[in-house]
Amino acid sequence: MMEKGKISTAQMGIMMYPTIIATAILIVPAITARHAKQDMWLSPFWASLIGFLIVYIAIQLHQLYPQKTLIEYSEEILGKFLGKVVGLVFLFFYLHTSGIIIREYGEFVVGNFLLHTPLVFVMGSMILVCSFAVRSGVEVIARLAEIIVPVVIILILANIALLIPDMEVENIFPIMGKGIMPSLRGAIIPQGWFAEFLLIAFLLPYVADHHKGKKWGMISVTTVMLTLSFINIAVLFVLGGITSRFIYPAFSAVRYISIADFLEHIEAVVMSLWVAGVFVKIAVFYYALVLGTAQWLNLSDYRLIVFPIGFLLLLFAVWSASDLVELTHFLGHTSPFYRISIQLGIPLILLFVAKWRKRASHQKVTQQG
Amino acid sequence: MGILQKAAKIIFVSVPLILLGGCWDRTEVNDLALIVGLGIDQKKDGQIMLTTELIVPQAVGGGKMMGSDGGGGGVQTLARSGTGSTVADAISNLQEKLPRRVFWGHTKVIVFGERAAKAGIRQHLDFLSRNSQIRLRSNVLVSNGTAKSVFELTPPIEQSSAEVLRELSESKLLMRVTIKDALQMLSSDASAAALPMVKILPPEKGKKDLQTIAFIQRTAIFKKDKMIGDIDDKLTRGVLWLRNEIERANITVTLEGEKGNITSTMLRAHTEFIPKYEKGKWKMIVKATTEDDIILNGTKLDLLNPKYTKMIEKELEKETNERIKAALKKVQKEMKADIFGFADMFHRKYPREWNRVKNRWEEIFPTVEVIVKTEAYVRRPGVNSAPQGLPEQEVKQ
């Protein structure tokens, strides 16, 4: 096996938390608010159903092929040629998605803080740091996540608490004033993020206590769901009807914090820790991509291709959109369907075929016996 | 290659990369003009004139030894203007006249001149909220003259006019509106807004003309984004009741059959709104509750007698009721501007019925029947019981 490190299921769950949250708190609240209005806090609940489903599928597939990753068992399930094709689709998907994530990170940093710094530079330095983490293997990324995630969670809760004086609870009414549809429509975007839970298919083979995989996968989805809902509620209470007018509503709300004319302008602190969260996110995607590519090419070691793929990632980040408007449009319109079809559609087909094959071979065995 | 050499190589490459990322657009503090107040005026020809109040930095400590004649602390401020067809244009014009780059991160106060307010403030607010440096928490005000005149003052107490207005805003005696609040009011269902209005206090005798402050005295009423009029401080308190924003107020009442006044101060106040939709009629029940302390007793009554307290509570309720009704009469019936956000309250409670009339809200709003119910509780008569400075036999028990 290429990866010799072992992680625990708890570590896997912890790794997945920033992997979903880090970019889901940027523009997702705004897009959700545009569709769901004051019901935006409900949308993560609907969206998380996809997350639970995907964790379930990934665990089922894992139980059929315990030692293999997504790329490896799709070959086994669909045969050499089709399996390679599906693997390639996944790899391109992860290459493209990672590029977009890096671009989102870059756009946010450049748009709000380093206005005149070239985008390529901001993104390039992040990829470089991540590539060191990826080269060190899954264990190192997991331990980094273990350090970063508690701080990120405390930070999110602290920020929500600091916003309490500026909250206006009546912004939440009417609850489901136009029925359930707006909140469901608002869930279309966040479900694309929940679909990223498919990444556990790359981590599960390296988990030591894999019988607990389902439990921790579900815990992770639940915490992500609650976090997103809390953030949406806080933003809604503070900004109300104008939430959707901002590109990064959660960030705008954090900038609004001012306690006793003293505790204010704290967005720099938020920013620095948020960057740590994004770091974990990019590292996990990057790791899955590198590992998958190495397995697809039947290489003996994945470390060789870390830097070349990092360079490709930078190119994809630059190519993914020409500007912020295009990026937001893609994320708000095309990406949910793109993400769901690959991260839910293909695994679902894989699972069905695998089950069917197992049954067929089982029958054959019993017939012969 | 040894591991140490390898590590040294990696550090050599990565440390500068990480550390220098932010240096790309670094700006030293002494290259920045820190703007604390921003005034937006519209000239007769429609051009926008932007006035900024900026801090003139001085060497710490050294400033005093040089014998600065500013009077105040170490920091002085300076007002400088630029013109252009939009605010953004005016800034580039202003920048030409400034040796340092403007920095908006410390802008605490934004003042609109009356003419600019009447012409519409939406595009200015858009600029302010779109800018990544300006904070949504900055206070927004309207000047009853030009905004420029406000920032030209050299206030005797605070370091800058902006600081004066910020402190006054945050005292919440009258309206206090941030950019966020203004945007919320304008984009709400009601699409009307109220902003505090400032006036320049006439300078004391013997002081120079500019040695005074601007203070919040009235409230400017906006329909859509255009100012349509203003109301005085008394009516403003009524409006604050109707917005559930009142925090401080003194109310003076007289009791029937008694000479002299009684003044109470508000400890806590709360307004509850109950929207009703019955038989095609929109109705709003406003329940205002206040808790007060007596701070002045000009009558001969011993305030430890519960009978008198009850009488005072009655009068307080009446007075509050009148204030609220006066504000309603002016703003709802005459100006027809829904600055109380009734539209949103109806929308929240009756989403379906509301959707049917939302296009006609402007006609409906003045006809909404408002029932004002007030409750007052006198909690304690200060630290005195019987009226002070009165012979024992004259006190009414």
Image (spheres, coloured by chain):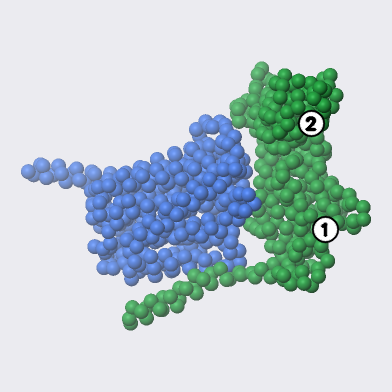
Mark 2: amino acid:
Gln
Residue B92 percent coordinates (x, y): 75, 63
Q: Which mark is residue B388?
A: 2
**The disc numbered 1 marks a residue on which chain?**
B
Q: Mark 1: which amino acid? A: Thr
**Residue A235 % position (x, y):** 56, 44
Instruction: Give the distance between the C-alpha atoms of the residues marked 1 and 2, in whole angstroms.
Output: 43 Å
Q: Secondary structure at mark 1?
A: loop
* Residue drawn at 41 percent across, 75 percent down: B10
The chain identifier of the residue carrying mark 2 reads: B
Residue drawn at point x = 73 percent, y = 31 percent: B384
Instruction: Judge the density around disc 1: few (<14), some (14-19), many (≥20) Cα neighbours within 10 Å.
Output: many
Q: Quadrant of residue A135?
A: bottom left
Residue A251: percent from the left, percent from the top?
56, 52
Check residue B297 in the rendering and tell me which mark sits there, or answer none: none
Hue of chain B? green
The residue furthest bottom is: B1
Q: Is residue B93 visible?
A: yes
- Residue B291 position, x and y percent, is 68, 30
Q: Cβ–Cβ below 8 Å for labels 1 and 2?
A: no
State the hue of chain A: blue
Identify the image quadrant of residue B29. Answer: bottom right
Residue depth check, mark 1 versus mark 2: number of the one nearer the observer = 2
Crowding at dot 2, Cα within 10 Å, few <14 / some 14-19 / many 20+, comes out as some
Q: Which residue is mark 1?
A: B154
Q: Is residue B161 visible?
A: no
Residue at (28% x, 62% y) in the render: A5
Q: Observer-nearest residue: A166 or A360?
A: A166
Secondary structure, mark 2, is: loop
